[in-house]
């Protein structure tokens, strides 16, 4: 199968799905002034925080059609983007955001809350941060698109969870890239302190290399103890 020029090796055109801004525009036409896209990354790893991002894209910079000249031409689900391209896209996305925020939920909080609740908490923190930055008084003008099948708890905003939202809704895809780049950078910094674990490579996921490093060197504070029951 033919690959899109500039795409990550091994990601074929047939499987590539690019999100649109259609749903956001529908909400704007319905009277909402602030359309937030929210996503989290890092639910599966054995180590590191869950990271969520929330962003409001500048609607005036998004055209009716996606063309090669569009700043968002390559923006899509962060899982289909190479690490190098994600970093470039994240910078571009931030330049075209009215506002964005990143929030973390620590490994200790994951252990205390479970990963489902920790993921929702990370998204709640990210969305709340956006609201605080913009000092939005009338929250009835805010709408949130959330990746997944669950609404964010305790934010009191109109919202819609969208399964595989990062492959359908541009604002969610943008948030997923911001969150992923932020989390990867955190794990690279951990790698500088604990190079024997290989965090820069596996980013905390349960690879064979990571599991062997845990068994050889022990458990760190950054590890999710509740995820390690079958390993240690």
Image: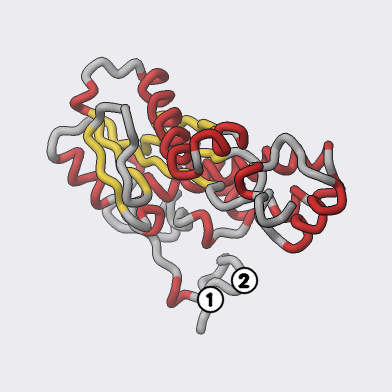
Front in this rendered view, residue 103 or 88: 103
Q: Is residue 124 above or below residue 164?
A: above
Q: Please tell me how crowded label 2 is: few (under 14), some (14-19), or many (20+) other residues with Cα within 10 Å.
A: few
Q: Is residue 183 above or below residue 156?
A: below
Is disc 2 placed on a helix, strand or loop? loop
Residue 92 in sight from this viewpoint: no
Q: Is residue 195 above or below residue 209?
A: above
Residue 9, numbered circle: 2
Residue depicted at 39% across the width and 47% down the height: 172
- Point out residue 24 in the picture as x, y percentages from the top left corner: 26, 44
Is 149 displayed left or right of 189 in the figure? Answer: left
What is the distance, in whole Å, between disc 1 and disc 2 at their CAs? 8 Å
Is disc 1 placed on a helix, strand or loop? loop
Residue depicted at 56% across the width and 52% down the height: 44
Which residue lies most toward the left here?
30
Residue 36 in sight from this viewpoint: yes
Disc 1 target residue: 3
- Point out residue 46 in the picture as x, y percentages from the top left corner: 65, 49
Residue depicted at 32% across the width and 51% down the height: 149
């Amino acid at each position: 199968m033919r690959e899109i020029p500039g795409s990550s090796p091994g990601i074929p055109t047939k499987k590539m799905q690019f999100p649109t801004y259609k749903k956001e525009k529908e909400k704007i036409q319905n009277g909402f002034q602030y359309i937030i896209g929210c996503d989290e990354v890092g639910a599966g790893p054995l180590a590191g925080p869950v990271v969520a991002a929330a962003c409001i894209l500048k609607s005036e910079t998004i055209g009716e059609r996606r063309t090669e000249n569009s700043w968002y031409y390559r923006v899509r689900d962060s899982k289909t983007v190479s690490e190098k391209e994600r970093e470039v896209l994240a910078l571009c996305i931030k330049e075209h955001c009215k506002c964005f925020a990143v929030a973390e939920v620590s490994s200790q909080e994951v252990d205390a809350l479970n990963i489902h609740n920790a993921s929702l908490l990370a998204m709640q923190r990210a969305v709340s941060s956006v609201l605080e930055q913009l000092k939005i008084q009338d929250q009835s003008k805010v709408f949130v698109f959330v990746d997944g099948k669950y609404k964010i708890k305790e934010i009191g905003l109109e919202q819609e969870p969208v399964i595989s939202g990062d492959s359908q809704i541009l604002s969610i895809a943008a948030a997923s890239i911001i969150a992923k780049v932020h989390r990867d950078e955190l794990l690279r910094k951990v790698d500088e302190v604990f190079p024997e674990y290989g965090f820069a490579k596996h980013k905390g996921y349960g690879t064979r290399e990571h599991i062997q490093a845990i068994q050889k060197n022990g458990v760190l504070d950054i590890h999710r103890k509740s995820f390690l029951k079958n390993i240690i």
